[in-house]
Amino acid sequence: MPIKQMSRVHISATLIGCALLLSSPTKGAAQDPRDPSARKLTQTLVIGFVGGFVQSDDLRHSEVQIARHLQATYADSVQVHVFRNRQRTKAHQSVVAFFNAAANEQGQAPHVILFGHSWGASAVVYLARELAQDGIPVALTIQVDSVRKHGQDDSVIPPNVAEAVNFYQSKGIIHGRPRIIAADPVRTSVLGNFQFEYDTEPAECHAYPWYNRLLFKGHTSIECDPRVWSQVDRLIETRIAPLTPPAIAAQLMK
């Protein structure tokens, strides 16, 4: 691996680590959601979107692997669902139902976290905008090599989102959006736009269809890169345990 690539990845990982340390919710007295005594206090819904024409249960893809890992690790303390990028309406309905049920039970807003790759990453932004119209706050959006769909803009994060982060690569026929911005920087913190480069594909890509690896090298490489998805996993896990304080939830829903 060239020194240039190593340097860029190292810098990206360092910046992401700093962003996590600075922006992760304060844990203080918060209980570990894996502790059965804490499960009634944890209200977190994680929605993932797969890219292209991938099926939502295809375990070759990192989005599905992350979802399975989160569900297995946190059991019934978190709900995790993966949708195809064309199932945004179904995902929207799931979020609204979860939000209403959790808010009625606990009297405060639950955590909603959205992530995805390619068309699935742009679906994250489009869904967040729909949730803004419903008055539903989103704790975190994660875009991995986001590709806009039907000409819609996937670069501007709506103000109901508390935090957003973007991972991308810029080579090949299909490449991700290099920059996202907040519609309202006061209400949304963009943790960063982090670029990855690939001279050779990660070994994990060998499980992917040959035509994806041949035609969309960089776009496929970032989807199966464990360095990227370990950051995605960490970003989500550090935001599962704590509840959004009522004052913050109320501000997000204004």
Image (cartoon, rainbow, N blue to C red):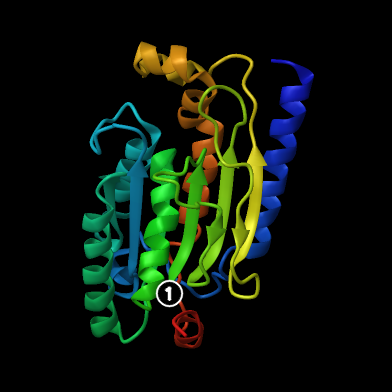
Residue 143 x %, y %: 50, 47
**In-front residue for pair 97/180:** 180
The percent position of residue 207, horizontal first and vertical second, equals 36, 17
- Residue 120, relative to residue 125: is it above or below? above
Rendered position, 47 above or below 188: above
| Residue at 65% across, 70% down | 185
Q: Residue 188: name its quadrant.
A: bottom right
Picture residue at 57% right of the left edge, 47% below the top: 166
Compared across the picture, whether 63 is left or right of 82 comes to: right
Residue 120's quadrant in the figure? top left
Count of number-bearing discs: 1
Q: Position of residue 125 (x, y in %)?
A: 45, 56
Residue 96 sits in quarter: bottom left
Which residue was labeled with disc 1? Answer: 243
Element type at mark 1? loop
| Front residue of 41 and 230 | 230
Q: Which residue lies furthest to the front in this view?
A: 151
Pick the residue in front: 40 or 123: 123
Label 1: few (<14), some or many (≥20) within 10 Å?
some
Which residue is at 30% across, 70% downward? 37
Residue 220 position in % (x across, y down): 46, 24
Quarter of the image that includes the N terminus = top right
Q: What residue type is labelled 1?
A: Leu
The residue under the point 38% across, 41% down is 66
